[in-house]
Amino acid sequence: MIAQKEHYHFAQEIVDTIETSAKVRGTGIAKRTPEYIHKKIDQEQAIIAIAPDGRFAGFCYIETWSHGNYVAHSGLIVHPDFRKYGLAKQIKTFTFDYSRKKYPEAKIFGITTGLAVMKINSDLGYKPVPFSELTDDPTFWAGCKTCINFDILQRKENKMCLCTGMLYDPAQDKKNMTAAAAAAAPDHSYTFDKKVLKRLKKIKQALFLKK
């Protein structure tokens, strides 16, 4: 559901779960505060999953950049008690559909090191792209300051990092659709290849994490 003020009390648990998950995976993460989560809730840009017993199960939020021309989904997290049930994909799909209705002309993008998230993005129509095709809004890249890999991003002048950039372009999607398929799901030319992206991730680590 779209998070409401009644969900404020989950904010600390949300940021703690995001940070703990990043540490377990050994990946970088842009840290957020409970106050920031409250702000996204107030803007109706936060998606939350609540279990039948009232426990926090998952979360994701929306950010807009370059005067609304770009939309990013960030902070996607599923509580450890509710993993392996496909909840991450449900949350991401809900957020994607909500974003398309709220910002129909915006390009939707994300940067991630997680292969599971890449697979979900690919199923939704995202394609891997260089960072140059993402927003050039300095505020977005400044949000990476708390990531452990921020020095790599700086050295590469915001053009490359351990994360992979993925983009969904509604305009391009319309061009790829045939008249017969216009009312059906888009026919995406990119097919997710986990092995290829896994190799890409290893290559980046070898290049950027050398002492």
Image: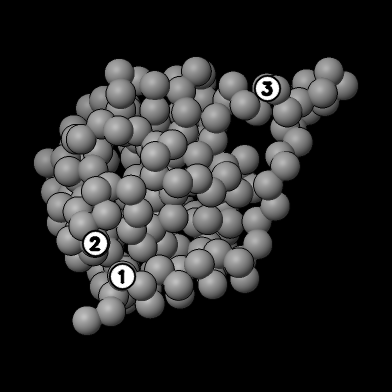
Q: Which residue is mark 2?
A: 152
The image shows residue 148 at horizontal and vertical percentages of 20, 65
- Visible residue check, residue 196: yes
Q: How many marks?
A: 3
Determine the residue positioned at 20% across, 45% down: 143
Q: Is residue 15 left or right of residue 72?
A: left
Q: Front-most of 138 and 44?
A: 138
Q: Looking at the image, is mark 3 or mark 1 nearer the viewer?
A: 1
Dot 1 or dot 2, earlier in sequence: 2
Classify 77 as above or below 175.
below
Q: Quadrant location of residue 70?
A: top left
Q: Secondary structure at mark 3?
A: helix
Q: Is residue 185 left or right of residue 165?
A: right
Q: Front-most of 61 and 52?
A: 61
Q: Quadrant location of residue 23?
A: bottom left
Badge 1 crowding class, 10 Å Cα cut-off, few under 14, some 14 to 19, many 20 or more, is some
- Visible residue check, residue 40: no
Q: Which residue is mark 1?
A: 208
Between the C-alphas of marks 3 and 2, the distance is 35 Å
Q: Secondary structure at mark 2?
A: helix
Q: Secondary structure at mark 1?
A: helix
C-beta proximity under 8 Å, tags 1 and 2: yes
Q: Which mark is residue 174?
A: 3
Q: Looking at the image, is mark 3 or mark 2 nearer the viewer?
A: 2
Image quadrant holding the C terminus, namely bottom left
Dot 3 or dot 2, earlier in sequence: 2
Badge 2 crowding class, 10 Å Cα cut-off, few under 14, some 14 to 19, many 20 or more, is some
Between the C-alphas of marks 3 and 1, the distance is 37 Å
Dot 3 or dot 1, earlier in sequence: 3
